[in-house]
Image (cartoon, helix red, strand yellow):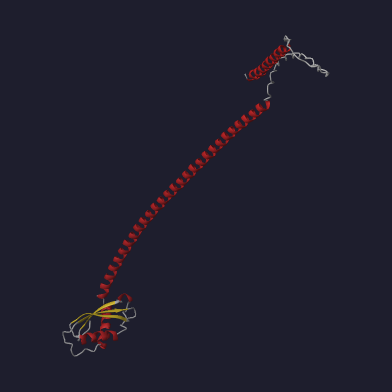
Amino acid sequence: MVQRDNTIVPISMAVLLHVALFSSMLIAVNFTRHVPITPMAIQATLVTEIPKVAPPVVRKEPEPEPEPVVQEPEPEPDNSEQLRFEAEEQKRVQDALIEKERLEKLRQQKEAERLKKEREEAQRKKDEEAKKEREREEAERKRKEDEQRQREENERIRKELEAEQRQQEITDEQQRLAANSSPAMAAYQFAIAQRIRRNWSVPASAGSDTRCVVSVRQIPGGEIVGVNILSCNGDEAVKRSVEAAIRRSSPLPEPSSPELFRPLLELNLTPEQQN
């Protein structure tokens, strides 16, 4: 369609040029025709001057009509370079899309692997925490069981010790009672009374009915470490004389047998006799 429009314009110009030339030729022919001359009365004076002869009219030959210019069709433009460029551009775009898809798949794959590792790590930590919690619970259970066993064992030992102690106390009390009623205990107590009687200066305020009960604490060897008057119906002078007599009697006589030794003695003292 473009080539046809380009051909019409030159043809139209050629036609207009021929029309103009043809018109100019017609006008020139009309001017060269002989026009009849009308005689006129003219007074003339002879002049020796040579008249000028008009140059002959040269008839202008009509120019030959120009041959119509036939516009040759323009050659097809060489667009091979453009096609090559477009093909290369299309290939570049296609390669870029393929690379983009490859990178996106790679990114998605890495993201999936990262999420998988995170899930596995979270599960591993969860399993480790659950394992540690089970271990803590098991250790706590064992600790409580051990404590319970220890309490039971301690209770058993305590009961056994208490039973042994009670049995020992019973045995000791039986031995003490037996010893107290034995001649050896009687001799031991008489020796202590004699020692205190010799050291007691009875005050004048003491009567025949004066009676003092005194607790005496001694250590092995007879050394007196404590005197406590439990009851006494005498005055303060009597009480002071009793305590002084007992302290002056230290150390007390030792028993004939260690089984007869008593760290705590309870003595009944009267002015006439001390038991």
The tally of labels here is 0
Image position, residue 253 (x, y; %): 31, 82
In the displayed structure image, the side of residue 239 where residue 17 appears, left or right: right
In the displayed structure image, the side of residue 246 where residue 40 appears, left or right: right
Image position of 141 with respect to 66: above or below: below
Image position of 273 with respect to 136: above or below: below
Image position, residue 173 (x, y; %): 27, 70
Image quadrant of residue 144?
bottom left
Q: Residue at x 25, y 75 (%)?
A: 180
Image position, residue 73 (x, y; %): 69, 18
Image position of 193 with respect to 172: above or below: below
Image quadrant of residue 183?
bottom left
Q: Residue at x 29, y 84 (%)?
A: 247
In the displayed structure image, the side of residue 222 where residue 44 appears, left or right: right
Please name whichever residue, 79 or 92, is drawn nearer the observer in this view of the structure.
79
Q: Residue furthest bottom?
A: 204
- Quarter holding the C terminus is bottom left
Image position of 221 with respect to 23: above or below: below
- Quarter holding the N terminus is top right
Please name whichever residue, 6 or 172, is drawn nearer the observer in this view of the structure.
6
